[in-house]
Image (spheres, rainbow, N blue to C red):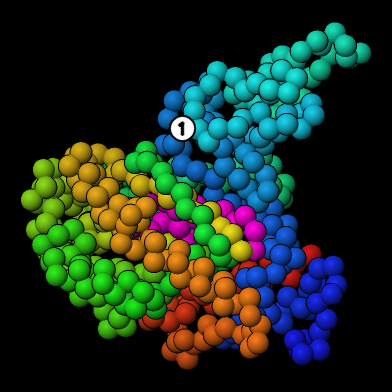
Amino acid sequence: MHSYNTVSWHTPAPDVGMIESMVQPGRAHSRIYTDERIFQLEIDRIFSRTWVYVGHESEVPNVGDFKTRVIGRTSVIMVRGKDAVVRLLVNRCRHRGSQVCETDSGNTKVFRCAYHGWIFHLDGELADCNGPEAYEEALDPKEMGLTPVPRADRYRGFVFGSLASDGESLTDYLGGAARMIDLLCDASPTGAIIADGGTHKTVFNANWKLVGMDGYHPNTLHASVVAAWGRNPDGGLGATHRESPFVDEAGTRTRDFGHGHVMLDFRGHRIKHYDSLTGFLRRIPGGEKYIAEMHAKHGEERARLLISLAGDAHLGTFPNMQLIHNQIRIITPISASKTEVTMMAVRLDGVSDEMNAERFRQQESFYGPAGAGSPDDSEIFERVQRGMVAEVNPWIQISRGMGRQKVDTDGSIVGLITDEVTQRGILRYWKQLMTTP
């Protein structure tokens, strides 16, 4: 085991032994959040090898619709082709390397490189180039087209890409986390969600691994918000949060599915408030119909659970997607000390406009730019980052609940809501990937 009293950090990059020593049972070295050399290794060994969430198919509903996103350092285009297939293409002209798409989203008939005028079809094939007669041999449209992302797959409309040509399947990678994605999708009576509720982004000066999946902080950092929920038991969140879900006795749990996928599991807490939530829903146009349809489709037990959760899987899939409350959240690392978070509100397909409007208002109230909760998180992440730069005593604690966590019947590791099961699960897989050359 390396000691930080003796190991020199003047080497070009941390070696496997150093990485091994930085995550130990119940604690982690703060340098994994602050060192740019470690960040560059994360891009290479995590974001360039694993399955990374890119977007939802409903974001590009029409032929020619596209979104540009990032996998590690690589800009990619998610586009719906003329054959209605959603593809992932590397956003890089095959001629001289310029990006061919410079906007976040839009609709187009072709992609045209502004540098020399090369044109590409929606499926990536080369359509035309400026002055083709200058090439001794005809350019092969397939060989010179936009490069497909080496591997692309989807689960229930969620599109993932991997820059590695080989590796485990998306199904194996998601494992038990896939059933938690179902909790969001199955909250719709048709089993579908639509990610068209608007997007906003925030950038904060802190490391990407700090974002979310912590059940220990809300009663302190968001104390005023938690108290407000309890004062409004007839409101949407008040119907299920009249007692704080962030206390160990509330029936909420932390859960680790492996592969870095973790969850704040509210199922035990929310189901206790089924009656108060359905009472609230029945006052919204379309609410009674929704409840009846869910029971007809799923049966009593499953319907009660899905209605109670309202699609809040509160799941983090490693390394960059989180499903929290009514949003899909994409985490984009920029540097060791800067992170961009994109938040997209989602609609439930097959429910009334009034029900979806209520969901959007709840989303805005906590996560919007002027929301009651998200700005708190951004501020505290930056305070943590500033604190961890000072390496007087560099170890941070992630040991809460280690002695009481258990392996559940589904194979996941489970602890109480204030336990740091989630942090340990993320860093366990982080360490595995970072020490694999």
Judged left or right of residue 313, residue 421 is right
Q: Position of residue 402 (x, y in %)?
A: 49, 87
Residue 141, percent from left and from top: 74, 19
Q: Residue at x 26, y 68 (%)?
A: 225
Q: Is residue 282 above or below residue 16?
A: above
Residue 123: quarter of image: top right
Q: Position of residue 316 (x, y in %)?
A: 47, 62
Q: Nearest the camera: 288 or 383?
A: 383
The residue positioned 76% from the left and 29% from the top of the image is 94
In the image, 327 versus 32, the foreground residue is 32
The count of marks equals 1
The answer to whether 228 appears left or right of 23 in the picture is left
Residue at 36 percent across and 47 percent down: it is 345
Q: Is residue 220 visible?
A: yes
Which residue is disc 1 drawn over? 60
Query: Which residue is at the far top?
Result: 133
56 left or right, relative to 244: right
Q: Is residue 428 above or below residue 347?
A: below
- Residue 236 in picture, x, y percent from top left: 18, 58
| Residue 325 on the magenta span | yes
Q: Quadrant of the C terminus?
A: bottom right
Dividing the image into 4 quarters, which one contains the N terminus? Answer: bottom right
Main secondary structure type of the part rendered in magenta:
strand
Magenta-highlighted residues: 316-336
Label 1 element class = loop
Q: Is residue 319 visible?
A: no
Q: In front here: 13 or 150?
A: 13
Q: Is residue 213 above or below residue 236?
A: below
- Residue at image position (42%, 36%) is 58
Q: Is residue 49 left or right of residue 388?
A: right
